[in-house]
Amino acid sequence: MVFSGFTFLLLFFPITALLVLISRNLRWQNAVLLITSLVFYAWGEPKWILAMLAVTGVNYLCALPLQKKELPRAAKRLLLAVGVFAGLGLLIWFKYAAFFVNTVGGLFGHPDLLTPAVLPIGISFYTFQALTYTVDVYREKTPVQKNPLKLLLYVSCFPQLIAGPIVQYADIAAQLDDRTITSEGYIRGFRRFCVGLAKKVLLANLCGSVIAELGMADAGPLTVLGAWLGAIFYSLQIYFDFSAYSDMAIGIGRMLGFQYKENFRYPYMADSVTDFWRRWHISLGAFFRDYVYIPLGGNRVGTLRLILNLLIVWTLTGLWHGASWNFILWGLLYGVLLIFEKLVLGKRLERIPSVLRRIFTLLAVMLGWVIFYYEDIRFGISHILALIGLNVTDGGISALPLFDDKRLLLLGKYALPLLLMLVASTPLAKTIADKWEARQQIKRCGFDLAAAIVPIGLLLLSLLFLVGQSYNPFIYFRF
């Protein structure tokens, strides 16, 4: 079940929202959310709900004794290790075992020793969330949760279950016991959800259609124009697709009384790679910072150890996205760029004109997305070379044509949508919308009609477009 599907929009969420609203107290609301969240997850893959229950149960049992002051530190570390391994072990088996085994086997002429397992949806997210609970209790950052159903609700809560954002337990613990659904929160949440739905249906899916017309998935022959269009539209697609899901998750959470942290802050406005990762998938960056980078020593180490720490973190960041060499290369690219900014450029980065910094960052990010897109690294390299007009074949290096009729027609066809998407990826669109609403004084019975027109219009337009769309899954479901 996806947020942008008719089953969710017209059946699941309206029923869930109604049941939550008529619930007499928070206890009943939690019960409704737990049951509906389990139904949401089991809708497509009912057997994998057992894996999520197992991870949650093990972490619950391991964390319970951690609150005891008299428990020896060695015992606490053992319990922590068991809880962490329960989630990571499951994740490693399903997501990485075949990759590692077959990589080693390939060195000895046996590259297909293990068939990749079917990946349970959302496993990269809920295993990390369960991990944050046990680690936070061990660090005494948050009290132990004695009610296993509340812990299960935290892990399984459907708004952020499938594709994030990654919600750390310490940030949500208090809301499991004390939250209020208000009319203002409900309206703001509804607006946020509608904006996210529109970004997914009207923008991200359109980018996907353009990429299909370009033939990127088939790694077909490219012109220079085709290579740039592919890189630009994929950069926009992955941003609108994933930020849309985060918008919808945050909006749904707000309607249900939860306050989730922001996961995107206009990343393509970044003026450095460091700044980009403060803006892109913020919850993932925070997870690796708090649970990997800082425990490794963070910045408070020597230069060589700092380089090693950054390379470890960014290798793991790449691997988190998938068991493939292109993801590892993508992560290492960012590791190298961040090391360069931190250790080579340093304060000199601030003296470079802002425009040049933003251009360099965008080019680096687009280069990264090209690597990210192609699981076969050879195709990614070919696409990167095509950006500068080169075509490498067994016969040598040749120059690519700058454009052809097909790509020129494609550019003309999507020039206006491309311009609108470029604007939508900046704060300008939100600024215009906020100013427009601020100038409207159309109120009846205390209800702001101006504030309702835009989200309702986006919702209806999105539903209309969904009728004719055959491609609709979120990109990050595969991770």
Image (spheres, rainbow, N blue to C red):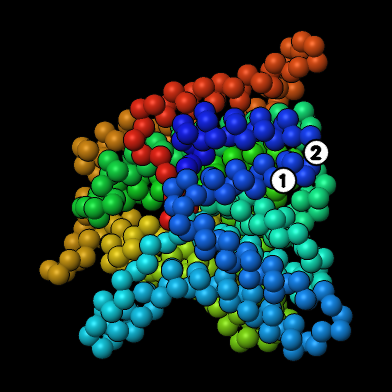
Q: Position of residue 283 (x, y in %)?
A: 64, 58
Q: Amino acid at mark 1?
A: Asn
Taking the image as shown, residue 293 lies to the left or right of residue 52, namely: right
**CA–CA distance in space, label 2 to label 1:** 9 Å
Mark 1 lies on a secondary structure that is helix
Tell me how many marks there are.
2
Q: Nearer the viewer, residue 71 or 158?
A: 71
Q: Nearer the viewer, residue 365 or 241?
A: 241
Q: Is residue 310 above or below residue 203?
A: below
The local crowd at label 2, few if under 14, some if 14 to 19, many if 20 or more residues have their Cα within 10 Å, is few
Mark 2 lies on a secondary structure that is loop
Name which residue lies at 29% across and 43% down: 212
Q: Position of residue 139 (x, y in %)?
A: 78, 74
Name which residue lies at 64% across and 80% down: 81
Q: Nearer the viewer, residue 260 or 83?
A: 83
Q: Amino acid at mark 2?
A: Asn
- Is residue 115 something that shows in the picture? yes
- Is residue 246 something that shows in the picture? no
Closer to the N terminus: mark 2 or mark 1?
Answer: 2
Name which residue lies at 21% across and 65% down: 392
Q: Position of residue 157 (x, y in %)?
A: 63, 49
Q: Is residue 428 above or below residue 440?
A: below
Q: Position of residue 231 (x, y in %)?
A: 38, 51
Question: What residue sits right under mark 2 in the picture?
Answer: 25
Question: What residue sits right under mark 1 in the picture?
Answer: 30
The local crowd at label 1, few if under 14, some if 14 to 19, many if 20 or more residues have their Cα within 10 Å, is many
Taking the image as shown, residue 78 lies to the left or right of residue 26, namely: left
Name which residue lies at 42% across and 29% down: 466
